[in-house]
């Protein structure tokens, strides 16, 4: 079957529009084709009337089918950009979100010199690696309870050549013994277990252990905050991502644990998203 680049894009766009809004369908159609052909967007525009290379029509149709089944684009491509870093992602890890860049920016503002940083539940390593690459003097320890996620984080650590990150298998603080840190960061699971979004859209392809946290979504955040004082140096900070409607509850948890200077930051969508103290 011979088809031009433009025709292929158009038919993919029409199919993807059944799944996502038209503007996204158009972008996703392009991203998937760029991936198949190994080209950039400028190439697609310049070669719109070229015939598609042999086999790539079928290969493209296959990727579009996977997307139509609901598989997230990041899992199909095998990577996602986060804070300017190209990160390998697999279905063993949460897909890094732009909202989490708020947490990284806030962390970088607190870091000066050779501070010790802990990232709890690192997944792809997104937060830890972004911090380590922008604060090269910091020493970042990144832990995850999932061995499979740690493998992905190690792939990313290795490809980014960030020697100031060490990875450790640990369920929250359990494997940290007596270590203490100047800054603890985390994007823990925080969605209510019964939330219907967990079985919809991209979320249903992501690890539930990275998303759901008990009946009220605060089970892990509660534990992380309560135990943090034992792992923080004097004057250290704890910084957590949470749900858009959890800021007040999270502030109360910080207060109960004896934290001071409690502050909530908003994400790119203007939702309260990160609370630090
Ligand atoms: N922000 C993500 C979402 O709602 C959830 C991430 C998380 O649970 N840590 O899609």
Image: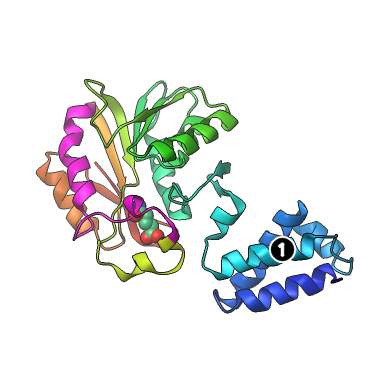
Q: Is residue 266 visible?
A: no
Quadrant position of residue 18: bottom right
What colour-coding does the image apply? rainbow
Q: Say whether residue 224 is magenta.
A: yes
Ligand 1 shown in quarter = bottom left
Q: Tell me if residue 138 comes above or below residue 49 in the rendering.
A: above
Residue denoted by label 1: 60
Which quarter shows the N terminus? bottom right
In the displayed structure, does residue 31 sit left or right of residue 128?
right
Q: Residue furthest right?
A: 50
Q: 147 or 275: which is nearer to us?
A: 147
Q: Position of residue 20 (x, y in %)?
A: 55, 74
Q: Position of residue 53 (x, y in %)?
A: 85, 60
In the displayed structure, does residue 176 sit left or right of residue 91?
left
Q: 162 or 258: which is nearer to us?
A: 162
Q: Tell me if residue 111 comes above or below residue 56 in the rendering.
A: above
Which quarter shows the C terminus? top left
What residue is drawn where x is 32% and y is 50%? 209
Q: Which element carries disc 1, helix, strand or loop?
A: helix
Q: Position of residue 70 (x, y in %)?
A: 51, 67
Q: In this picture, which residue range is highlighted in magenta? A: 205-232
Quadrant position of residue 149: top left
Q: Position of residue 159 (x, y in %)?
A: 59, 32
In the displayed structure, does residue 95 sit left or right of residue 218?
right
Prevailing SS of the magenta stretch: helix
In the displayed structure, does residue 98 sit left or right of residue 178?
right
Q: Is residue 92 visible?
A: yes
């Amino acid at each position: 079957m011979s088809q031009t680049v433009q025709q292929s894009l158009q038919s993919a766009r029409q199919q993807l529009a059944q799944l996502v809004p038209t503007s996204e369908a158009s972008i996703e159609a392009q991203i998937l084709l760029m991936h198949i052909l190994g080209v950039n967007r400028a190439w697609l525009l310049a070669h719109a009337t070229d015939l598609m290379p042999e086999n790539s029509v079928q290969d493209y149709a296959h990727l579009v089918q996977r997307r139509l089944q609901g598989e997230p684009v990041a899992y199909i491509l095998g990577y996602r950009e986060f804070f300017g870093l190209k990160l390998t992602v697999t279905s063993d890890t949460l897909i890094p979100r732009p909202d989490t860049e708020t947490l990284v920016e806030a962390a970088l503002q607190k870091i000066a010199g050779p501070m010790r940083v802990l990232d709890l539940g690192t997944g792809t390593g997104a937060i830890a690696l972004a911090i380590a690459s922008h604060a090269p003097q910091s020493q970042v320890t990144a832990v995850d309870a999932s061995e499979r996620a740690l493998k992905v984080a190690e792939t990313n650590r290795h490809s980014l050549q960030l020697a100031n990150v060490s990875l450790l298998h640990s369920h929250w603080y359990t494997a940290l013994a007596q270590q203490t840190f100047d800054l603890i960061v985390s994007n823990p699971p925080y969605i209510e277990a019964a939330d219907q979004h967990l079985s919809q859209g991209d979320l249903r392809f992501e690890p539930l252990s990275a998303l759901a946290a008990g009946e009220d979504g605060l089970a892990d955040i509660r534990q992380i905050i309560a135990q943090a004082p034992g792992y923080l140096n004097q004057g250290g900070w704890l910084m957590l991502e949470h749900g858009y409607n959890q800021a007040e509850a999270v502030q109360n948890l910080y207060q109960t644990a004896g934290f001071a200077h409690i502050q909530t930051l908003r994400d790119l969508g203007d939702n309260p998203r990160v609370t630090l103290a």
